[in-house]
Structure formats: structure tokens, C-alpha cells
Amino acid sequence: MARPMKWRKVCCLPENNKFGPLDSPVDTKNHVIMTVDEYEAIRLIDLEGFTQEECAKQMNVARTTVQGIYTEARKKLAESLVNGKVLSIEGGEYRLCDGLGNGCGRGCYKHKRGRCFTDNEDRGD
């Protein structure tokens, strides 16, 4: 029997969820999809300076899980940058934190910025 899925804790959705060359046609051939939990791993490790261990604690998963998420996210970033593909951030196995300090640490975007998008809010897409 398979293990039950453990949701990855994410502080908030990105304000912008599409990136790429301005002159690129929008089709599946020129498109890379990064999941929200992959975005969160990049944000915590590369932007906030977390170690993989700290990132794992923040996301409420094992360090080896973060390592896999992070590796996939970096491959997708490289694919988008090197090959000029549109990068979209969507989907994944995550739950948004409630922003009330329940396990949120120094990397919680809600506490730092005071503003965060949720699944129900319009990001201006």
C-alpha cells in the first residue's frame, strides 16, 4: 500500500505566475510548468537563503523531499531561461499556510510582506 501524500506547506502564491520571452508564442511546445511547491523551494533556498534542512522544516516535509523538489524546480528554470520557454507556476501538492504563526518561521512571506495571494484572490492574470 502506498504512503499517504504529505502536503507541502507554502506561505503564499506568487504575485506573478507567468514569465518568459515577450515574443514567444504561447503553445505547449514553448511552455514549462513549475508547481507552486517547486516555486516555494526556490524562494526559500535561493532568495531567503535557507538550507535544505530549514526549507524542509518550513514546508513540513523531509529534507530528501525538498532536495527532489528543488532539483526539479532548477531544471525547469534552466529549461525556460536557456531555451526561451514561457515558465508558468501552477498546481502541485501544497496547502497554503494560514499566516497565524502555526509553524510559520522567518521565511513566511505573509509575515514579511503583509500581503499574500490566496487561491481565491485575483492576481491580475
Image (tube, rainbow, N blue to C red):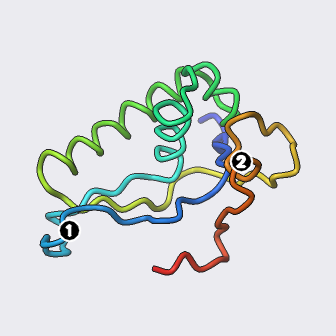
| Circle 1: residue type | Thr
Residue 90 placed where, x, y %?
A: 46, 62
Q: Nearer the viewer, mark 2 or mark 1?
A: 2
Residue in front for this viewpoint, 1 or 101: 101
**Image disc number at residue 28:** 1
Residue at image coords 63%, 27%: 56
Task: Name the residue nearer the viewer: 81 or 65.
Answer: 81
**Picture layout, residue 92 above or below residue 125:** above
| Residue 40 percent location from the top left of the image | 54, 44
Q: Earlier in the sequence, mark 2 or mark 1?
A: 1
Q: Secondary structure at mark 1?
A: helix
> For the residue marked with disc 2, what is the amino acid?
Lys
Tell me the SS state at disc 2: helix
Q: Give the class, few, some or many, for how many residues have Cα within 10 Å of label 2's Cα (few <14, many ≥20).
A: few
Report whether 42 appears left or right of 57: left
Q: Which residue is mark 2?
A: 112
78 versus 64 height, above or below? below
Tell me the crowding category of disc 1: few under 14, some 14 to 19, or many 20 or more residues within 10 angstroms, Cα based: few
| Position in image of residue 87 (x %, y %) | 30, 58
Q: Residue at x 14, y 45 (%)?
A: 82
Rendering quarter of residue 3: top right
Does the residue at mark 2 contact the one at mark 1 (Cβ under 8 Å)? no
Residue 73's place in the image compared with 33, above or below, is above
Q: Quadrant of residue 29?
A: bottom left
Q: Quadrant of residue 73?
A: top left
Count of numbered labels shown in the rendering: 2
In which quadrant of the rendered image does the N terminus lie? top right
| Residue 35 pos. (x, y %) | 45, 52
